[in-house]
Amino acid sequence: MKSLKEITELLYASGVPMPGSSMSDEDALSYARKNFPCGNFCLVRDWLWLDIETTDAQRHALEKTQRQPALIYAHQVVFDSERRWDVGDFVRSSLLHQFSKGFHFKTLNSVYLLLGPGSRKRANAGTIACLI
């Protein structure tokens, strides 16, 4: 099991700053409803982009399934269209499928709209697995 120190550092130590959308929560919800009318979106703040340390073989296997070794961990859900998480909950996404527009983090199932500033960090899969 990973140490509490490793998990705490992953969640709270500084990383490489990344910008998200500067939209207000209300504007972001309106934007999401317009651009994703079928749902499957989640608005998040206070987020971390986590690059997962992988071997070349693992990366190649992910590429075959159109995924990349990265995910989002957000300390605050603003809104989830599928009501998987309540407002204020934390969330960990599944693996990245595509990143676009500077704040659309798309998985194979959902799009996470990254609101406000966040940070990017590298982590091993074992530490990430302890988050949820």
Image (tube, rainbow, N blue to C red):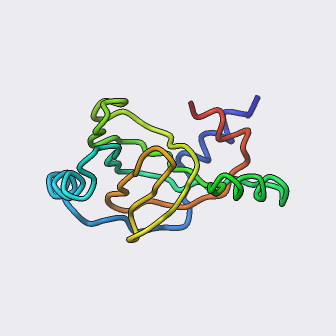
Pick whichever, 99 or 77, lies toward us: 99
Where does the N terminus fall, quadrant-wise?
A: top right
Count of marks placed on residues: 0
Where does the C terminus fall, quadrant-wise?
A: top right
Pick whichever, 41 or 11, lies toward us: 41
Q: Measuring 69% from the left and 51% from the top, which residue is drawn there?
A: 123
Left/right placement of residue 56 relative to residue 90 reads right
Q: Measuring 64% from the left and 41% from the top, which residue is drawn there?
A: 128
> How far across and down, in percent of the image, does residue 3 sit?
72, 33
Q: Measuring 30% from the left and 30% from the top, which residue is drawn there?
A: 83
Left/right placement of residue 5 relative to residue 84 reads right
Looking at the picture, does residue 50 appear above or below residue 23? above
Looking at the picture, does residue 10 appear above or below residue 17? above
> How far across and down, in percent of the image, does residue 114 sit?
37, 57
Left/right placement of residue 51 relative to residue 111 reads right
> How far across and down, in percent of the image, does residue 7 sit?
63, 39
Q: Measuring 30% from the left and 39% from the top, which residue is drawn there?
A: 80
Picture quadrant of residue 63: bottom right
Looking at the picture, does residue 41 appear above or below residue 17? above
Left/right placement of residue 62 relative to residue 42 reads right
> How far across and down, in percent of the image, does residue 86 sit?
30, 30
